[in-house]
Image: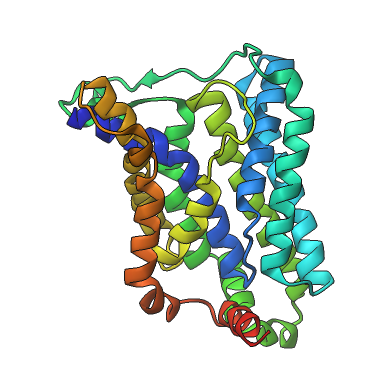
Amino acid sequence: MIIDLLAGAVRGGTSIMFAGLGETVSERAGVINLGTEGSMLLGALGGYAVTAQTGNPWLGVLGGAAAGGLLSLVHAVLVVSRRANQFASGLTLYFFALGITALFGVSYVSRQINAFTPVKIPVLGDIPVLGPALFTHDPLVYVGFVAAPFIWWVLFRTRVGLLVRTAGERSDALGVHGYSVTAIRYGAVVAGGALAGVGGAHISIAYANSWFEGMIAGRGFIAVALVIFAMWNPLTIMGGAYLFGAALSLASVLQSSGVAVNQFALNAVPFVLTLVVLAVLGRRTLQSAPDELLKVLDNTRTA
């Protein structure tokens, strides 16, 4: 049962990790995107639709990234160019994604696709406990193993990352040195949405291997909360995502082991965990938030 729970944590947390990494990039540039859930929804449908049409799940991943990035582009136009309220814009786009995926996703319900299948890594997959938990998964899980360290490296060890972080900390300094704050924030928000789209695609073409309305089930909102919990650090987001993945997989693991527990109570565990984490760490972690992000929160409280 422990092995199943560990494997479920990694598999179930991968989509949350991609979304959390994307939201980290966006928030590091000073833009909050509550539409992450919507980008995941569009990514799930886009990934499933492209995979169904082409038979290639990797093209499906690209389709999911494009769909998620496109929705976030709309968010960037509204909040960066038009100075709309970031919270209102994100929630509005989430409801838009909910409606549009329900409309165009009908034809893909119950449609069979060539989905990703688990791949056991030679030698590593034979290690007791760790082998089944970490090295017998679909390819996107392995991409996730690399994605978090890579994004950490980009943010904290490259010039691109320095520009993104400066946009979130001291945006006025960018203008002095001839950089466009608008362009940098556009790039960060769209990249964040694309990563959320990959997370959505993972759910539809690797995790559930199906499409149904509202299948993200709050994972995008969990990812937004995870960013605060992880203090905008991609490596911490990786561990936190797997923690929430364990909470998500707890119900199926206990049921398969014959443990009689109320399923509805177990389904609420991830969201209760989110509330507890925010209640315990919320104020302390906000002190680590980028300065431009704190300005957004302060303006919201003032309004």
Q: Quadrant of residue 248?
A: top left
Q: Nearer the viewer, residue 273 or 142?
A: 273
Q: At x 56% / y 58%, what residue is drawn?
A: 23
Q: Nearer the viewer, residue 109 or 127?
A: 109
Quadrant containing the C terminus is bottom right
Q: Against 263, is 119 above or below?
A: above
Q: Against 236, is 286 above or below?
A: below
Which residue of the protein is positioned furthest toward the left in this rendering? 128
Q: At x 33% / y 42%, what residue is drawn?
A: 247
Measured as percent of width and height from the top left, residue 201 is found at 59, 33
Residue 134 makes an appearance in the image: no
How was the colour assigned to the protein in this rendering? rainbow
Q: Quadrant of residue 288?
A: bottom left
- 93 displayed left or right of 23: right
- 252 displayed left or right of 295: left
Q: Nearer the viewer, residue 213 or 292?
A: 213
Residue 89 makes an appearance in the image: yes
Measured as percent of width and height from the top left, residue 135 is found at 31, 28
- 176 displayed left or right of 198: right
Q: Nearer the viewer, residue 276 or 286?
A: 276
Q: Against 85, is 14 above or below?
A: above
Q: Against 28, is 73 above or below?
A: above
Q: Quadrant of residue 230?
A: bottom left
Measured as percent of width and height from the top left, residue 191 is found at 65, 53
Q: At x 55% / y 82%, what residue is drawn?
A: 291
Measured as percent of width and height from the top left, residue 279 is found at 36, 69
Quadrant containing the N terminus is top left
- 210 displayed left or right of 276: right
Q: How many labels, in total?
A: 0
